[in-house]
Amino acid sequence: MERRAMLKLTGLAGIVASGMAPAVVKAQENLRWRLASSFPKHLDTIYGGGEVFAQKVRELSDGKFNISVHAGGELMPAMGVVDALEQNSVEAAHTAPYYFFGKNEAFALSCAIPFGMNSRQLTAWMYHGNGLKLTRDFYANYNIVNFPCGNSGVQMGGWFRKQINTPEDIRGLKIRIGGLPGKVIEKLGGIPQNIAGGEVYQALEKGVIDAAEWVGPYDDLRLGFHKVAPYYYYPGWWEGSVGLDLLVNKKAYDGLSQHYKDIVSAASTYAHLDMQAKYDARNPGALKELVGMGAKVLPFSKEVLDVSFKASQELYAELNESNPQWRTIYADYRAFQKDELLWFRFAEARFDQYMQSVSL
């Protein structure tokens, strides 16, 4: 015991001599932040990502770094978190960055774009490709430092009041969908609608809209869409995965000790993996329940997927011409995705296809 105590003392003396003591002392300070979520509390998996992050920060800091999590609308409107961070009104936020494509379409690239990467590919790009560097350069324009902090995996294609057999069935269709997917739907003759999550059920029930996309079985079951729009299509070609981000005000982040910066990074990575695992674990049971209650689960036809893919490529060509920030990040995104698809088409795809064909 005496030897251990001596090692600790001599180690601390060395730190003090090296000039690192201020950082060590600062790492032990009590700190309190507020985190604004863009999600409601009743969506426990996606809103819960912020809570998982905050809990892990508290644990790793021995209770000295505490972050209160606030549901969308508590501190500011759910879609106002980027403005709040930019204006130094809050320290952190947890959100889906594609909500802010109206500010700049490049926000969507760390989150989801039509016919984009799946969750593993997007995670690989962010952590071991150029994704994090490129998106951090972009976010610096908004006084923000970003961290991957969750992924829902590939989403479902939404709930429809009528069947979608051909591309013609999309013409005139009023569908609750926004962002870049909405732009693609417009190219197909559909009519995208921006409707808040809490109003979607009533809009479907009353026929104000003909269809709505949300997330996947676990979250969709809670909202009851199957009661008013029985046709449940897949896949959500506009969301091969949805990456959630922890966004941190740059001034608040720069004020952290290196120790606390490392905790923020580690906690966001933990929350990132935890959310994907929860969705993968909870969606199967929820899908069974939905089918048991009458939901008709149907695939989009190849014809529908092909015309949607073509329209998305037209949109990206237009954005490459109009938005230089998009063009820079998108070029790297697509180059990385091409290599990922080359790998996934072999061992991954063949193994999955076989396992899905056998009886366990």
Image: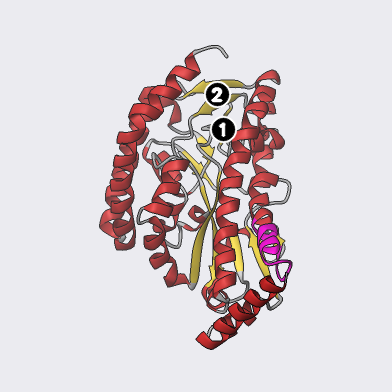
Write the start and end of the magenta stretch as one range.
Answer: 53-68
What residue do we see at 58% from left, 39% from top? Answer: 215
Determine if residue 84 is in view. no
What residue do we see at 69% from left, 27% from top? Answer: 227
Residue type, numbered disc 2: Lys
What residue do we see at 55% from left, 37% from top? Answer: 213
Q: Is the C-beta separation of discs 1 and 2 under 8 Å?
A: yes
**58 inside magenta stretch:** yes
Reply above or below: 323 against 302.
below
**239 inside magenta stretch:** no
Q: Identify the disc placed on residue 162.
A: 2
Q: Identify the disc placed on residue 59.
A: none
Q: In this image, 141 relative to 218: left or right?
A: left
Reply above or below: 231 against 125.
above
Reply above or below: 331 against 21.
above
Picture quadrant where residue 263 is located: bottom right
Residue type, numbered disc 1: Asp
